[in-house]
Image (spheres, rainbow, N blue to C red):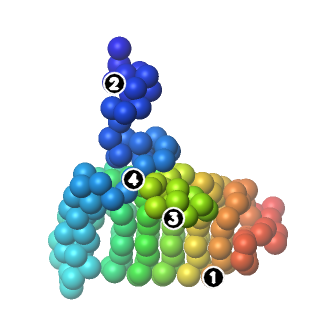
Amino acid sequence: MTKKEELELNPALQSELERMKSGQPYDAHTPEMRAWRDEVKKLLRRLNITEYHDGSMADITRQLLPNSAPDVYVEPPFYCDYGNLIYAQEGVFINFGCTILDGGGVYIGRHTLIAPSVNIFTAGHPLDADERDRWEYCKPVRIGERCWIGGGVTICPGVTIGDRVVIGAGATVTADIPSDSLAVGTPARVIRKLNE
């Protein structure tokens, strides 16, 4: 029996981390989860106080985002929950002041540009207060290739953005956006097709 089959047959064997990664309700406040985030905070602190482009920023970024391409560029300050659940392909640029809550996995296609103060959230919470006290959930966010995510955009849990999309500054993306689209507003809506 594989570990996955064993966990599916007996959910009590799953750690909160495994539950989070698989999209199940989980408790983010266990010692295991806090310890993981504390280690990430140490790397974030080092990244966010680095003054020069002397190679140390790239080294810290590779440690923080081990599942991303080596040339991914992050302009500090930058904030994330876990880091290793960010899967950014080559040529991705993340500008100043971005926050990525990556518990559900954030997938960013090659040569995508992310402007300052963008928020990407995979974490969500139940509407019922009693449930919200006990658990949360995560849904992955997927952003295609060669996109431009404008300044101050917020991308909500579970959203997929197609290839070559432009999201206008200040938009809140609550639903999927098809490839080759310009989307603006809150909630974001497609106002025209691009590249036609």
Residues at discs 2 and 4 in contact (Cβ within 8 Å): no
Rendered image quadrant of residue 78 = bottom left
**Which structural element holds mark 1?**
loop
Q: Would you name the residue on which mark 1 appears?
A: 170
**Callout 3, which amino acid?**
Phe
Q: Is residue 18 left or right of residue 173?
A: left
Hey, which residue is sitting farthest bottom in the picture?
Answer: 51
Q: Is residue 170 left or right of residue 2?
A: right
Q: Earlier in the sequence, mark 2 or mark 3?
A: 2
Q: CB under 8 Å between callouts 3 and 4?
A: no
Mark 3 vs mark 4: which is more N-terminal?
A: 4
- Give the residue pinned by disc 2: 3
Q: Quadrant of residue 28?
A: bottom left
What type is the residue that disc 2 sits on?
Lys
Comparing 92 with 10, the one in front is 10
Circle count: 4
Q: Which residue is mark 4?
A: 27
**Image position, residue 93 (x, y; %):** 44, 69
From the image, tell me which residue sits under label 3.
121
The reply to whether discs 2 and 1 touch (Cβ–Cβ < 8 Å) is: no
Give me the residue at 46% from left, 61% from top: 133
151 up-or-down from 39: above or below:
below
Q: CA distance from mark 3 to mark 4?
A: 17 Å
Secondary structure type for disc 3: strand
Counting residues from the start of the chain, the first of labels 1 and 4 encountered is 4
Q: At which x and y percent is residue 60?
A: 21, 66
